[in-house]
Amino acid sequence: MAAVQISSREFRNKQKTYFDLASAGTQVIVKRNNEQFLVTHVRQEDITISPKMEKEIEMAIKQARNGNVITIKNQEELNSYLENL
């Protein structure tokens, strides 16, 4: 995957160009001071729950309703649970 790194000023001056590049699959990295930001194209499937995910959510809800859950009340219980995984 191709990538370009630009300053925030460059991005501000040529936003359309860099949005078009991101839409085409190019990674656009915008640098501002000591930070970097990634401009990325968000597709509909990136924000939509897939049928598989929907089934997994439904299964988790059923498990919770049936009491098939683990209740952890404090940090000590959490540590113990994680150590026994």
Image (tube, rainbow, N blue to C red):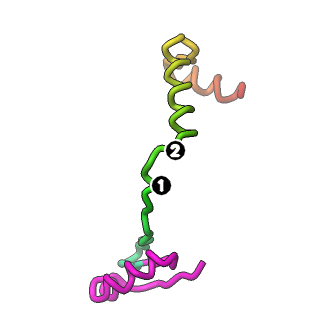
Is 76 in front, or is 32?
A: 32
Are discs 2 and 1 less than 8 Å apart at CB? yes
Outermost residue on the right side: it is 84
Where is residue 60? Give x, y as percent: 54, 25
Above or below 50: residue 57: above
Q: Quadrant of the N terminus?
A: bottom right
The residue singled out by tag 2 in the image is 50
The magenta segment is 1-29
For badge 1, the amino acid type reads Glu
The residue singled out by tag 1 in the image is 45
Q: Which mark is residue 5?
A: none
Q: Residue at x 32, y 83 (%)?
A: 16
Where is residue 46? Give x, y as percent: 47, 55
Is 81 in front, or is 1?
A: 1
Outermost residue on the top side: it is 66
Q: Is residue 22 magenta?
A: yes
User: Closer to the N terminus: mark 2 or mark 1?
Assistant: 1
